Amino acid sequence: MVKQAKGGRAKLGALSRPTLPKKSASIGHVLVVEDDAILAMTLEQTLEDAGAAAVTVCAAADEALAFLRENKPKVVVLDVHLADSDEGYEIAQLLSAIGPNPPKIIFSTGNPQDIPEDIASMGPVLEKPYDPARLIELAKEPPKRGLLGLFRRPRTKA
């Protein structure tokens, strides 16, 4: 089930989440692909509190792929080992092939040593459990410009 955040959230009960100051810079639309419901809710609320324009949570690879067919988030937080499959790698490869400005990928895993080097090079890897403040820092970092980006002309206002 894909769940999109829209304002007024219920409290997370006994879970404690970091208090992050709202920043004026928006993170943009974030897709969280995470099968642990508690972690997904915590990440969703943390990202909203940090200024994400929208947060969509998908608990399974097929849900994430269906969402990505119709949407292009700015950031994707990707658990590479989902309960329904280990298709996190395939999702990362698909994202890296999307046009000239693919979404930023942030990997989330309990076993970072299991991520193949070529996949891990697509984005930062956060080892669970991790500090949500670190996730926010990574999400707000400007995208790295690849080799082709060096040849693009900067846009000027007419």
Image (cartoon, grey):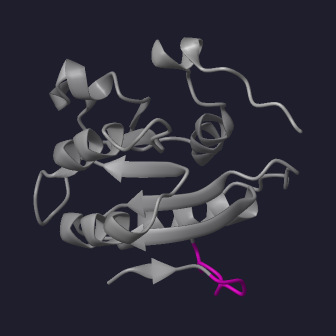
Q: Nearer the viewer, residue 148 or 54?
A: 148
Name of the residue lying farthest toward the front: 158
Residue 61 percent coordinates (x, y): 21, 63
Q: Is residue 95 above or below residue 67?
A: above
Q: Is residue 125 left or right of residue 48?
A: left
Name the residue: 33% across, 21% down: 121
Q: Is residue 155 left or right of residue 116?
A: right
Residue 41 can be seen in this image: no
Most common SS among magenta residues: loop
Q: Nearer the viewer, residue 40 or 116?
A: 116
Name the residue: 23% across, 69% down: 60
Residue 3 percent coordinates (x, y): 45, 81
| Quarter holding residue 8 | bottom right
Residue 120 percent coordinates (x, y): 30, 26
Q: Nearer the viewer, residue 85 or 158?
A: 158
Q: Which residues are magenta?
A: 6-14
Q: Nearer the viewer, residue 118 or 50?
A: 118
Q: Is residue 114 left or right of residue 105?
A: left
Task: Answer whether residue 55 is magenta in the image.
Answer: no
Q: Is residue 116 above or below residue 70?
A: above
Q: Is residue 86 left or right of residue 37?
A: left
- From the image, which quarter does the N terminus lie in? bottom left
